[in-house]
Amino acid sequence: MELPDNIAALYHRCIQGAATPQEHAEFLQYLQQPGHEDILREVLRRGLREHKPLTDLPPEREDVVWQAIMTATGATPAATPVYRMTWLRMAAAACIAVLLGIGGYTYYRSLERRPMAVQTPLAPGGNKAILTLGNGKVITLDSISNGQIAGENGVVKQNNGKLAYAADPSGAVTMHVLTIPRGGQYQLQLSDGTEVWLNSASYIRYPNRFDDKERSVEISGEAYLRVAKNATKPFIVVSKGQRIEVLGTEFNLMAYPDEAAIKTTLINGAIRVIQQREQKILKPGQQAAVTNGAPGIVITTPDLEEVLAWKEGKFRFYNTDIATIMRQVARWYDVEIVYQGQLPGEEFYGAIPKSENATQILDVLELTHKVHFEIKGKKIIVIPGPRKN
């Protein structure tokens, strides 16, 4: 159905974050009026269609989402179909409650907080890294001042969590290791100008400068690489037995030891992925997956916003199971995850900034009524089903 022109305009101002408090109130008042249930449904459906990562949500999922929103807010279809729920709460439930997306995370801040078993902040991660030099010396980068690192020509710690190398032809080639702990992230510029963004619980092993033959690094965990072009010297990335060959390109590599597959996603340029005797050349937008214990390289076309969300400072879930979500939570917040009972087989949808405390992402997951949590110190216990009041 078509929304009335004035309501359509208000809808777009709300989802774009441009509405004034008075406009929000006007929108709310209109949606609360009896007889406007179809318009409320249309607002939700537009949110489904217009806001990634849920643009492909099938129609049958809409009814499930609709019922979940009413359940989460205590409304019933026969009595008060969502009338007692404020527009901001509805938008938050629809957008962030890992149910659908209707306008962004900004609405989430108006969502009423519900008590966890133990309210612990569980602060988000930040710029943390440990540098191991060729002579074995270990430097905790977040504990030293910015500037050139003593005894290492051309190695500089810069602002905003970045370590940069400049080629020093006069010095010996030594291997360095940059390790990102759980709860950390860091950026690295190699001596050839290649830029590397490293996610939590990752490491990269690389030379302080590349020799005349090739550029080769080893990576574990997750990294985004913007490789400097050099047609005469290929760039090689080795990870868990997989080999990636590039000349100049941008791609994301996810190769955590606790994940079932190595996933290499090409953003632009071209790369060759080699696994044992098989090799595939990727096109931009494609992803190569190598699953542990399974032969072959599987090529798919993933949602790039989901793949790159970590680099953009977000958690983004699209058709994601709870175990995968909790592995990301464990790495970023440096917590232990414990499961109690049978895990729900549901798929979760939504997005939330990584700058928020862990309790806030757990809150929105709980709104699905498929799972709830208890926090004990640095341990998160995952429990199936809704929280019992």
Image: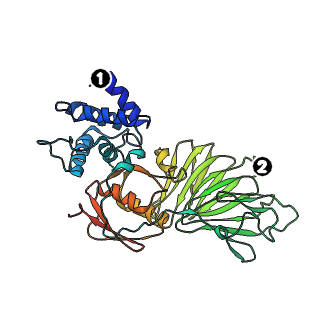
Q: Residue furthest top?
A: 5
Q: Is residue 253 visible?
A: yes
Q: Relative to 148, is 7 above or below?
A: above
Disc 1 vs disc 2: which is toward the camera? 1
Percent from the top left, x then y, of residue 371? 28, 61
Of callouts 1 and 2, which one flags the residue occurring earlier in the amino acid sequence?
1
Percent from the top left, x then y, of residue 379? 39, 73
Q: Residue furthest front?
A: 22
Say which element carries label 1. loop
Q: Nearer the viewer, residue 88 or 283?
A: 88
Amino acid tagged 2: Thr
**219 displayed left or right of 328:** right
Q: Relative to 305, is 224 above or below?
A: below
Residue 4, numbered label = 1
Q: Relative to 103, is 146 above or below?
A: below
Q: Nearer the viewer, residue 145 or 285?
A: 145
Classify mark 2: residues with Cα within 10 Å, few (<14), some (14-19) or many (20+): few
